[in-house]
Image: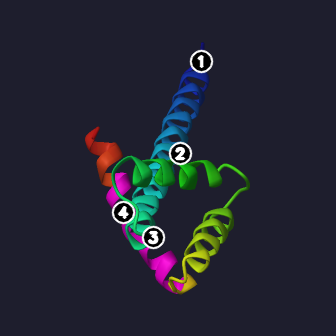
Amino acid sequence: MTTFDKREEGFEKKFAVDEEQKFKAEARRDKLLGLWIAEKLGLSGDAAAAYAKEVVIADLEEAGDADVIRKVTKDLAAKGVTVSEQDLRTKMGEFYAQAIKQVKDGI
């Protein structure tokens, strides 16, 4: 194996690890968002955890955040709770930063 091949293999491995961490951080972000929304919906305990899991699963429907925003907006509206899309996106950003730190720290 040439030096170039070894270097290429190293980049491929790093890319795979980075993508895995990104996926884990996004799933963690969605869980944190789900727990936050659950609180606004008046859910707690097992019901809040189950709702957070629904939010994580919703993010697997399509690329990007639109599927998550759509789900939580619909759920909030059904309960008469108003949270703007901008506020949701701001919270998602906060939760993503928190999730990245947790994933890096192995929490």
| Alpha carbon distance from label 3 to label 2 | 26 Å
Sequence-earlier tag: 2 or 1: 1
At x 37%, y 67%, the residue is 39
Sequence-earlier tag: 4 or 3: 3
Q: Which residues are magenta?
A: 86-100
| Alpha carbon distance from label 4 to label 1 | 39 Å
Residue found at the far right of this picture: 62
Residue 97: mark: 4
Kind of residue sitting beneath label 1: Thr
Q: Is residue 96 visible?
A: no
Residue 7 coordinates in the image, percent (x, y): 54, 29
Instruction: Please say whether residue 8 is one of the residues in the magenta stretch.
Output: no
| Alpha carbon distance from label 2 to label 4 | 13 Å
Residue 41: mark: 3
The foreground one among 82 and 27 is: 82
Quadrant containing the N terminus is top right
The foreground one among 52 and 42 is: 42
Sequence-earlier tag: 3 or 1: 1
Left or right of residue 87: residue 8: right
Left or right of residue 99: residue 55: right
Residue 52 coordinates in the image, percent (x, y): 47, 53
**Main secondary structure found in the magenta portion:** helix
Instruction: Please say whether residue 95 is one of the residues in the magenta stretch.
Output: yes
| Alpha carbon distance from label 2 to label 1 | 32 Å
